[in-house]
Amino acid sequence: MIEQSKGKRQELHLMHRKLLDITGVLNVESFDSEEFLLQTELGHLTIRGQNLHIKNLNLEQGLVSIEGLVNSLSYLDPGSQPSGKGFLGKIFR
């Protein structure tokens, strides 16, 4: 059974793998054209794809819209740390 976090809510709306609307966003940790790392009310969310960019950002309302080809969405396990592989991490692999 899925446990609902009290008072926490998040919605993901993906249209044709090209436009992703997300609610419940607290912070944009890092982003580039291939990967976004968002801190949300339900944990860290990683979005991977191609030609990704922010279409709309309103952290006061917790809304983010991302355009580009979305390949995957994944939540990090609670307690795990984000990989920190942003722009500099990818350059110095």
Image (cartoon, rainbow, N blue to C red):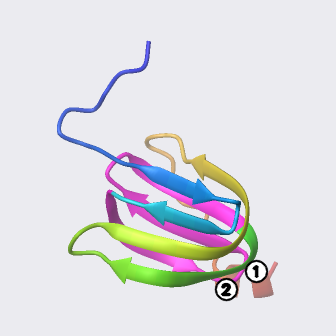
In which quarter of the view is residue 27 placed?
bottom left
Indicate the position of residue 10 as horizontal and vertical percent values.
Answer: 36, 48
In which quarter of the view is residue 36 placed?
bottom right
Q: Residue at x 52, y 40 (%)?
A: 77
Does residue 15 appear in the picture of this structure?
Answer: yes
Farthest residue in the front direction? Answer: 16
Indicate the position of residue 85 as horizontal and vertical percent values.
Answer: 66, 72
- What amino acid is labelled 2 in the image? Phe
Indicate the position of residue 25 as horizontal and vertical percent values.
Answer: 35, 63
Image marks 1 and 2: residues in contact by CB distance under 8 Å: yes
Q: Going by the image, does 69 lie left or right of 1?
A: right
Q: Tag on residue 87?
A: 2
Q: Tell me if residue 76 comes above or below residue 59 in the rendering.
A: above
Q: Main secondary structure of the magenta part?
A: strand
User: In the structure shown, which secondary structural element does the residue marked by tag 2 occupy?
Assistant: helix
Q: Residue at x 21, y 75 (%)?
A: 60
Q: Going by the image, does 46 lie left or right of 65?
A: right
- What amino acid is labelled 1 in the image? Lys
Q: Which residues are magenta?
A: 24-48
Q: In the rendered picture of this protein, how many numbered marks are placed on residues?
A: 2
Q: Tag on residue 90?
A: 1
Mark 2 residue crowding within 10 angstroms, few (<14) / some (14–19) / many (20+):
some
Mark 1 residue crowding within 10 angstroms, few (<14) / some (14–19) / many (20+):
few
Q: Residue at x 51, y 47 (%)?
A: 80
